[in-house]
Image (spheres, grey):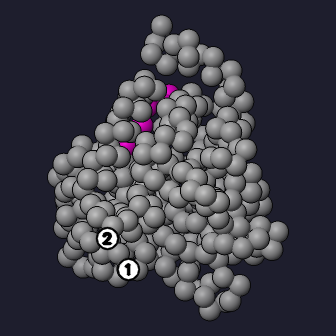
Amino acid sequence: MTPLLTRRVFCRSVAYGAAATAISNGYAQPPEDPPKGLMLAIGNYGMQSYKTEEAIRLIADLKYDALELTVIPEWDSSPEKLRGERRGTVRRLLGDTGLTLTSLMENLPPSATDAEHQKSLERLKLAAELGHDLAPDSPPLIQTVLGGGSWNDKKELYRDRLGDWRRIAESTKTIIAVKPHRSGAMSNPEQGAWLLEQLGSSPWMGMIYDYSHYAMRSLSIVETVKMAFPTTVQIVVKDVAKKGDQFEFALPGEANSFDHAEILTAFYIAGFRRNVCCEVSSQVFRRPGYDAATAAEACYDFMNRVFQKAEIPRRK
């Protein structure tokens, strides 16, 4: 019996089998002979005080397999700040450390204003160009949330604006992925699936799965994985805790609010073979006394144990 067919995993496979059969052509369909393992990554979103090169060395020293770079303008890893020779330096550093650049984090809420929409399109093009320069053999995806408001008020705007995003994704051969956010207009995977269906099947558009946005909302892991799996191109991990009437994000494992191993197992059984990225929320890195290296190490230690619990191998 293989590790993935233990009694615990076999019982869950019945519940998650529908996810595998629900895959649509052109979305996150696994290869016929999928590789073993998932990559464990972390982003430099919580490392704003670090130069990009310093963040990469830290992530490599902590034994992560991969990383996400933040391309929001204020970060050192934005396209505007990673220019010229620095791009070559970072590309070589990625090769020397063995880290895979899996994704770029943007923040591009679609705008009803045409001028703002054009600025967003330019930022997407710049991010795609950066991704190809840093990892030409396997360019990273670009992920973003879509901002606040009412789903009913915003969904048609999102559909129309993301139609232009799709054309950029296809022309640059870069996956663009949207992430439902618990305080956003698009706040659950059902809405994300609707939006991507409206755009039409494309290997260049996808969704980010982050259960911290669904926890404590009567949205189960089983339900959300089945809905999100066909279009999921990256899993993001962090925790969430309820503080009075509010919700506060935490490091993965810090709040112990749900079972991360159950999530990885569900996706892995269904055929997901991409990466799992730790996210340090701004609610964490704005805490007094926050230390980026300590936070990144805590994320690694916890998620490494999660991989072991789920009996899922790691890969580069």
Q: Which residue is drawn at 38% across and 80% down?
A: 74
* Three-letter code for the amino acid on which mark 1 is drawn: Glu
Report which residue position mark 2 lands on.
48
Q: Are marks 2 and 1 in contact (CB under 8 Å)?
A: yes
Q: Is residue 39 above or below residue 154?
A: above
The residue lying furthest to the bottom in this view is 115
* Residue 206 visible in the picture: no
Q: Are there few (<14), some (14-19), or many (20+) residues within 10 Å of tag 2? A: some
The residue lying furthest to the front in this view is 244
In the rendered image, residue 143, in percent from the top left (x then y), is placed at 52, 62
Query: Horizontal placement of 208 versus 19: left or right?
Result: left
Instruction: Determine whether the residue tagged by mark 2 lies in a helix, strand or loop.
Output: loop
In the rendered image, residue 259, in percent from the top left (x then y), is placed at 53, 35
Q: Residue at x 60, y 40 (%)?
A: 29
Q: What stretch is highlighted in magenta?
A: 33-40
In the rendered image, residue 40, in percent from the top left (x then y), is placed at 37, 43
Sequence-earlier tag: 2 or 1: 2
Most foreground residue, 170 or 90: 90
Report which residue position mark 1 lands on.
74
Q: In which quarter of the image is residue 224?
A: top right
Determine the main secondary structure of the stretch shown in magenta: loop
Q: Which residue is drawn at 66% across and 28% down?
A: 16
* Three-letter code for the amino acid on which mark 2 is drawn: Gln
Q: Are there few (<14), some (14-19), or many (20+) residues within 10 Å of tag 1? A: few
Quarter of the C terminus within the rendering? top left
In the rendered image, residue 311, in percent from the top left (x then y), is placed at 43, 23
The residue lying furthest to the top in this view is 1
Query: Horizontal placement of 33 versus 55: left or right?
Result: right
Instruction: Determine whether the residue tagged by mark 1 lies in a helix, strand or loop.
Output: loop
